[in-house]
C-alpha cells in the first residue's frame, strides 16, 4: 500500500514540477514576451533514411526519431531515468513487485479517430510486439498474464519480480499499436504500414523517398492545446559534409546522434544560430570499449588486461579523437544511467604501472623490446574508429606490446567477432537505462553464444558476477539492486573483461528559435508535443 | 648481323646525351633521386616510427617539434612523408615489376606464336581491359583484406594488360625480321629466340611504359590508401591525405604536404619516362642525329 501511495505521489510531483518548470522557461527568452505560440515548421535531419515508419515493426535509430512523433508509449523518462506519465496517467506496483497496474488517459485517440483503450495496450504487448520486437519480447515474456481490467486500466502480472520492468514502457521499447488495424492480420504485410496511425501529436502526411518525410499537426491530439508546431519535415541528407553545411546555412533546424561527424562538432558549436547539447541520450547511454577475447593468450591473463587499462590514455581519446565528446569510462555502467558505482578500482593513465603489471605477469621484453604480440580488428564504423586503432597501437607499443591492425568490412567484422575469431576489437552498446537491460548481457556467462553479435563474445565467465546480475534483475527494491550492482561492478573492474574507453556522448544541434526540443532521457525521440518556435 | 649487335652501339654516350637534351627529364631524375635518398635514409632522418605521437596534435608547419606540422593525433607530418616515400616507391616498383613479368610473358607468347594462342591470350587480356582499373583494384584489395602483398598484387593485376599488348605488337613485328628467321634456320629453340633474340630488341618501349607505370602504381596505391584500403600498419602518402581530409578546413597542412609529395613524385616519374622515350625511341633518336 505504501508503495502504491508513493507512486501516485511521484506522479503528482512530476506533474507539479513540469508545470512549475514550464512557466519560467517561457519567460527566460529575452526581449519579446513569448508564450508558447502555435505555428512554425521544423526541419530535422534523418540519417540514414528509415526503411519503414511503423515503430512496432522496426526500431532502428532513425525510425525511432521519426516515429516517436507519431506513436507513443505508456511512459517516458526524465533525465535521471525516473518514469513520467505519457499514455498512462498513473501506475501502481504491488508490494511484491509482481503486479503492475496502469491507468490510461481517457481522451487519447488514434489518428483515424478511434479511441485509444486498454485493449490496444493488451494487444500491443501480448501479441504484436511479442512477434516483431526482440527487446519487448524479452520483457513481456516474463509476464504471466496481461489483461484489461476495464477500458482504461491495464494490469501486468509477472512470473517473478523484474527490476527494470517500467523501463520497458518507453516509446521505442513498447510503442502502442492500434488493435483495430492490426488484429488478425499479417503485421509485416499490413497495407496500413504505408500510412502509420498512432496517438502522437504529429500525423503522417507524405513520404518522398530519398528526400523527406512530412508530418503535420494532429488537431485532435489528446493534450489540449498541443502540439505547437504546424509541421515537421525530416530531411534525408546522406552526405556528412552536406549535413554540416545544411546546419551552417540554417536550412535544417536539428541534427542528432551521428548526423554530424565528430571533427565537424567544434566548428558547428561556434555557430550563432544553433545550440549544442549532449543531453537527451541518457536512456541509450552507449559505452565504448576494447573488446578482449579472454580465450586467447596473452589476453587470458587478468594482469595483462589491467595493464591495457593503464597504458591507454582515455582523456587523450576523448579530447583528440572524439573532439571532446564523451566522458572517460570508469567501469561497465554508464554514469548517467541507474546503479552506477564510482567507488571501484581506478586505472589512471600510467604506462609505468602498465609495464610493472606486465613484468609481474611474466611478459619480459624480448631483444626487440617487445613483450607480446596481439591483433586488433578495427571496427569498420568510420574514420574515428580507425584513428582510435592507430592510437591504441602506439599506446600499447610504448609498454612493449606489439599490436597488428586488421581491417574488414561491417559484415566481416560481425562475422569474425561473433564467432570469436579476434584478439582485440572495439565495440559499444546502448544501455537502455538499466543494467539488467543493457549491461548484464555483455558479461554474464549464459550469454556466451557463438555466432551471436553483442553477446558475451569475450568468453568472460565469473559465477559470482552471474549470481549478482541475476539477483539484481529479480528484485525491484532499488537499494538492494544498487548493492548488488555495486558489488558486480567492483568485480568486473578488477577483472577487466573489456577495457572500457568512453561513456559516449552524441551532439544534438538545435536552432536557437526552437525551444523544449530535448526535455527527457530519450531526447530527440520524444513526441515533440511541447516544442515551440519563438517568432522574431 | 643481328639487331642485337647494333643496340649497344646506339646506346652508351648517345643515350645520355639524348636523355640530357630533355631538360624536364633531368629535373625529374634529380627529384626522383632525392625521393629515393629520402626513402633510403628515412630511418636516419626520423628514427622514430612515423606513427609515434611525438608532437602536440594540430601543430601548424614550422612548429618547434614538427617542421611540416603534426596531424590530428600529434604525428609528425615530415616523418610521415619520409617513411611514406618508402612505401610509395616500394609498392610502385614491385607492383610494376610484377605487372611487367605478367604482361611481357603473355605478350611475348601471344605475339610469337600468333594464331589460336594469340586469340586466346588477347581475349583474356581484353577481359581485364574492359573492367575499370581502379574499381577492380578496390574489389581485389577488399576481398583479400588490405596488406602490402594484396595491394601490390591488385595493382599488378590491373596494370599488366597494356604491357601485354605492347609486348605482343613488338614481338609480332620482330618475329618476321630476318635475324629471327636466321635464328630459326640455325636451329635455336623457341625459348632461346624469345629470350635471347627478340626480347632484348623490344625492351626500349617496354622500359618507357614501365617507368610511366610506376607513376600510375603510386597513384593507385595512394587512391587505395585514401579510401582506407591501405595496409593499416604502413604509413603512406595516400593514407595521410585520406586521414586528414576530414579536417582540411581546420588544418590544411596535414593533407597539403603529402599531396604535394605525391604530385611531384608522379610528375618526376612522368618526366623521366619521357626522357627515356626520347633516348630509347629509335625514330626520334635518328631524327636527333641527322
Image (spheres, coloured by chain):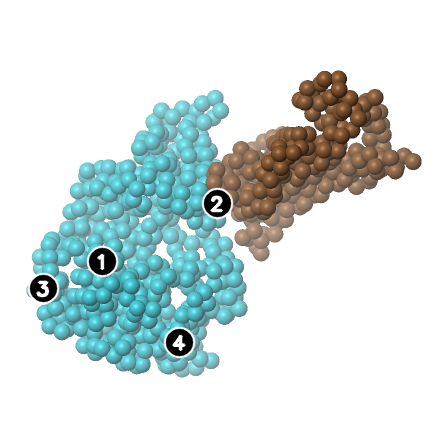
Chain colours: A cyan, B brown
Same-chain check, marks 4 and 1: yes
Residue labelled with disc 4: A231
Q: Point out which mark residue A2 bears.
A: 3
Residue pictured at 25% horizontal, 55% vertical: A135
| Circles 4 and 2: CB atoms closer than 8 Å | no
Near-viewer residue (A147 or A334): A147
Q: Residues within 10 Å of mark 1 (few under 14, many from 20)?
A: some
Ranked by sequence position, the earlier of labels 4 and 2 is: 4
Q: Answer with the quarter of the image where residue A256 lies.
A: bottom left
**What percent of the width, then of the height, locates residue A162?**
16, 54
Letter of the chain that mark 4 sits on in the rendering: A
Element marked by disc 3: helix
> Disc 4 to disc 2, how far (Cα)?
40 Å
SS of the residue at dot 1? Answer: helix
Identify the mark at residue A387; answer none if there is no mark.
2
SS class of the residue under badge 4? strand
Earlier residue among tags 4 and 3: 3
Q: CA distance from mark 4 to mark 3?
A: 44 Å
Closer-to-camera residue (A65/A263) = A65
The label nearer to you, 3 versus 2, is: 2
Instruction: For marks 4 and 1, give the one nearer the viewer.
Output: 1
Amino acid at each position: 500500500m505504501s508503495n502504491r501511495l508513493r507512486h501516485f505521489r511521484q506522479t503528482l510531483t512530476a506533474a507539479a514540477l513540469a508545470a512549475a518548470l514550464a512557466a519560467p522557461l517561457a519567460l527566460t527568452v529575452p526581449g519579446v514576451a513569448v508564450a508558447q505560440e502555435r505555428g512554425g515548421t521544423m526541419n530535422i535531419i534523418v540519417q540514414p533514411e528509415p526503411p519503414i515508419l511503423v515503430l512496432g515493426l522496426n526500431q532502428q535509430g532513425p525510425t525511432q526519431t521519426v516515429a516517436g512523433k507519431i506513436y507513443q508509449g505508456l511512459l517516458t523518462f526524465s533525465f535521471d531515468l525516473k518514469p513520467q506519465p505519457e499514455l498512462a496517467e498513473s501506475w501502481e506496483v504491488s508490494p511484491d513487485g509482481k503486479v503492475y497496474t496502469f491507468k490510461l488517459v481517457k481522451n487519447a485517440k488514434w489518428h483515424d479517430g478511434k479511441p485509444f483503450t486498454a485493449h490496444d495496450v493488451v494487444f500491443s504487448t501480448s501479441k504484436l510486439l511479442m512477434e516483431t520486437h526482440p527487446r519487448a519480447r524479452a520483457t513481456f515474456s516474463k509476464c504471466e498474464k496481461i489483461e484489461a481490467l476495464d477500458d482504461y486500466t491495464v494490469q501486468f502480472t509477472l512470473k517473478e519480480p523484474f527490476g527494470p520492468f517500467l523501463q520497458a514502457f518507453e516509446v521505442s521499447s513498447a510503442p502502442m499499436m492500434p488493435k483495430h488495424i492490426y488484429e488478425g492480420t499479417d503485421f509485416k504485410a499490413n497495407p496500413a504500414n504505408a500510412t502509420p496511425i498512432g496517438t502522437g501529436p504529429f500525423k503522417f502526411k507524405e513520404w518522398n523517398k530519398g528526400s523527406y518525410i512530412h508530418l503535420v499537426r494532429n488537431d485532435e491530439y489528446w493534450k489540449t492545446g498541443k502540439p505547437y508546431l504546424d509541421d515537421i519535415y525530416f530531411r534525408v541528407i546522406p552526405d556528412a559534409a552536406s549535413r554540416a553545411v545544411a546546419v551552417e546555412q540554417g536550412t535544417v533546424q536539428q541534427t542528432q546522434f551521428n548526423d554530424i561527424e565528430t571533427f565537424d562538432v567544434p566548428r558547428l558549436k561556434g555557430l550563432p544560430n544553433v545550440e549544442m547539447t549532449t543531453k537527451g541520450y541518457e536512456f541509450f547511454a552507449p559505452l565504448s570499449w576494447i573488446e578482449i577475447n579472454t580465450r586467447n593468450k596473452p589476453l587470458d591473463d587478468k594482469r595483462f588486461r589491467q595493464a591495457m587499462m593503464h597504458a591507454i590514455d582515455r582523456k587523450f581519446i576523448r579530447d583528440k579523437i572524439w573532439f571532446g565528446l564523451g566522458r572517460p569510462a570508469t567501469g561497465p555502467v554508464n554514469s548517467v544511467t541507474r546503479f552506477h558505482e564510482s567507488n571501484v578500482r581506478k586505472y589512471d593513465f600510467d604506462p609505468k604501472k602498465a609495464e610493472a603489471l606486465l613484468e609481474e605477469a611474466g611478459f619480459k621484453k624480448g631483444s626487440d623490446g617487445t613483450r607480446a604480440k596481439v591483433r586488433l580488428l578495427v571496427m569498420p564504423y568510420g574514420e574515428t574508429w580507425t584513428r582510435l586503432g592507430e592510437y591504441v597501437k602506439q599506446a600499447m607499443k610504448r609498454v612493449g606490446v606489439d599490436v597488428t591492425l586488421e581491417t574488414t568490412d561491417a559484415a566481416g567484422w560481425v562475422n569474425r567477432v561473433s564467432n570469436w575469431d579476434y584478439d582485440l576489437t572495439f565495440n559499444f552498446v546502448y544501455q537502455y537505462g538499466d543494467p539488467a537491460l543493457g549491461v548484464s548481457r555483455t558479461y554474464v556467462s549464459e550469454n556466451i553464444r557463438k555466432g551471436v553479435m553483442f553477446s558475451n563474445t569475450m568468453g568472460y565467465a565469473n559465477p559470482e558476477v552471474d549470481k549478482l546480475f541475476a539477483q539484481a534483475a529479480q528484485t525491484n527494491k532499488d537499494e538492494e539492486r544498487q548493492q548488488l550492482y555495486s558489488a558486480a561492478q567492483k568485480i568486473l573492474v578488477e577483472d577487466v573483461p573489456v577495457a572500457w574507453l568512453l561513456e559516449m556522448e552524441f551532439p544534438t544541434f538545435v536552432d536557437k528559435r526552437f525551444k523544449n526540443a530535448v526535455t527527457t532521457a530519450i531526447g530527440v525521440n520524444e513526441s515533440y508535443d511541447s516544442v515551440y518556435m519563438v517568432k522574431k | 648481323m643481328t639487331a642485337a649487335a647494333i643496340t649497344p652501339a646506339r646506346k652508351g654516350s648517345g643515350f645520355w646525351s639524348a636523355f640530357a637534351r630533355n631538360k624536364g627529364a633531368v629535373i625529374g631524375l634529380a627529384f626522383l633521386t632525392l625521393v629515393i635518398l629520402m626513402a633510403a635514409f628515412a630511418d636516419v632522418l626520423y628514427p622514430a616510427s612515423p606513427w609515434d605521437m611525438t608532437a602536440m596534435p594540430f601543430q601548424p608547419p614550422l612548429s618547434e617539434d614538427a617542421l611540416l606540422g603534426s596531424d590530428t593525433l600529434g604525428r609528425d607530418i615530415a616523418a610521415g612523408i619520409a617513411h611514406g616515400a618508402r612505401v610509395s616507391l616500394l609498392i610502385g616498383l614491385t607492383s610494376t615489376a610484377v605487372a611487367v613479368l605478367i604482361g611481357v610473358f603473355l605478350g611475348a607468347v601471344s605475339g610469337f606464336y600468333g594464331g589460336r594462342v594469340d586469340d586466346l591470350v588477347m581475349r583474356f587480356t581484353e577481359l581485364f581491359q574492359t573492367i575499370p582499373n581502379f574499381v577492380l583494384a578496390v574489389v581485389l584489395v577488399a576481398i583479400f583484406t588490405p596488406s602490402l602483398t594484396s595491394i601490390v598484387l591488385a595493382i599488378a593485376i590491373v596494370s599488366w594488360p597494356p604491357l601485354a599488348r605492347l609486348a605482343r605488337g613488338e614481338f609480332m613485328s620482330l618475329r618476321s625480321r630476318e635475324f629471327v628467321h636466321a635464328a630459326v634456320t640455325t636451329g635455336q629453340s623457341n625459348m632461346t629466340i624469345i629470350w635471347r633474340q627478340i626480347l632484348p630488341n623490344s625492351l626500349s618501349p617496354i622500359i618507357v611504359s614501365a617507368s610511366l607505370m610506376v607513376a600510375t602504381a603510386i597513384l593507385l596505391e595512394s587512391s587505395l590508401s585514401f579510401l582506407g584500403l591501405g595496409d593499416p600498419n604502413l604509413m603512406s602518402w595516400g593514407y595521410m591525405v585520406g586521414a586528414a581530409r576530414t579536417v582540411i578546413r581546420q588544418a590544411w597542412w596535414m593533407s597539403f604536404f603529402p599531396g604535394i609529395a605525391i604530385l611531384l613524385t608522379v610528375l618526376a616519374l612522368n618526366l623521366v619516362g619521357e626522357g627515356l622515350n626520347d633516348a630509347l625511341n629509335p625514330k626520334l633518336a635518328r631524327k636527333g642525329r641527322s
